[in-house]
Image (cartoon, grey):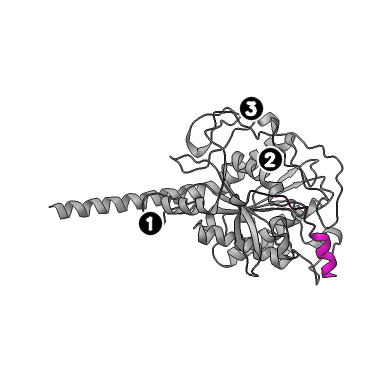
Amino acid sequence: MGDAISSLLFQPPPPTRLKESKVIWLTNSFGKRIPAFFIECPKDDRTGEGIRAPLPGEQPQGGGGGSYYSKGSTKSQMNHTLATGGSRTNGAGNAATPPSYNNNNNNGGEEGPQQVPSTPQIRTSKELEMSLLNNGRIGGGPSASGGGGTASCTPTILYSHANAEDLGNIYPWCKFLSKMLGVNIFAYDYTGYGLATDQGDPSEEYCFADVTAAYTYLNQTLQIPAHSILLYGRSLGSGPSCYLAAKTAEEGEAVGGLILHAPFLSVYRIVLESGCTLPGDRFANVDYAPFIRSPVLFIHGTKDSIVPFNHSERLLDTIIEPYRADPLFIKDMGHNNVHASVRPLFVERLREYLDTHILPELRERRKHSESARSRMVNRVRSARLQQAR
């Protein structure tokens, strides 16, 4: 039974290729090597916050907060709904073909005006290590030396993709999110997917080990603290994301936030209302959700024919009240595509989530970091003056 479920749940697409020089290789606890990439967004040097490209209709402008846009001009565009076409499915909650992530169109907002000073860049492991060495931090990390820099206000999203896709498929989408939200993005492949197809067949255990290896790289190698790391799980990716969110909470270092895009209660419950987690079930998100201690944003289309929309509604009910962000339930949207017409709404609501639940804490921590650094500098100056006397 378990093998049959795995064969339906995991259906990797034909591997797509990334430039080997841009791949960051990780090793999970089972000794499996999996690929990943890190997209770094441009940042405002004054605030330490990621720079956001403008949505259609927004006016790019220099200013604080790391955002080069002015709000209020696109509200009429926020109410678009998605008209979905039929999509062939392959059982257990995913499409037989990957969703379209082609963002090279004006309606999607992928290509912002030229006033935006830079675009997100994919970074190699060597570049990231040099940045850590030279600047003392990446993303939200504090200065490693205690001086020469303060905490950044740029969150890093740890992205867990859906079933029928791999790193090559999701790269344009991840770059779009980085550009529009002003965040860094770290995405990885599951064992058995993409460049890791030679590492064995995918499984729930490997997925949990894979997301843990990715998180360890961010948290320990790159020294990005837990509160600056957000988990984003789409469909299948909701499984490892819920697992890791609950795990970090139980360990006393909860991640900064969790975004669940078209998540499910558990794999069995997609096709069978069991009422409880049955033996052999996979990715029982409903069992992990009550232990999550991070702000959770649910995103789901009301016309999702693969993972029923009520899975998000029911999962939301299991999250403890203080950690429930306002969900984004998009009328008429299906499972596999964030269509260009709905992207302004999608981006706007994710920005609201960041501005309400994530950035205030990062700004407060940066403020304390700057105050501590200022006090340290003053003490050093006072000591030198005393010695000079």
Which of the two marks, 3 or 1, is nearer to us in this view? 1
The answer to whether residue 210 is left or right of residue 14 is left
x, y percent for residue 68: 54, 33
Query: Whole-percent x and y of residue 321?
Result: 64, 56
Q: What segment is highlighted magenta in the picture? A: 1-17
Relative to the observer, which residue lies in front, 53 or 74? 53
* Mark 2 neighbour density, 10 Å: few (under 14) some (14–19) many (20 or more): some
Q: Amino acid at mark 3?
A: Gly
Identify the element where label 3 is drawn: loop
Q: Which residue is mark 1?
A: 145
Q: Secondary structure at mark 1?
A: loop
Left or right, residue 285 beside residue 367: right
- Taking 138 as reference, is 191 above or below it? below
Residue at which label 2 appears: 346
Q: Residue at x 86, y 51 (%)?
A: 89
Q: Distance from label 2 to label 3 (Cα)?
A: 15 Å
Q: Residue furthest bottom?
A: 279
| Tag 3 near tag 1, CB within 8 Å | no
C-alpha separation, residue under disc 2 versus residue under disc 1:
39 Å
Q: Residues within 10 Å of mark 1 (few under 14, many from 20)?
A: few
Give the residue at x 64% y 50%.
325
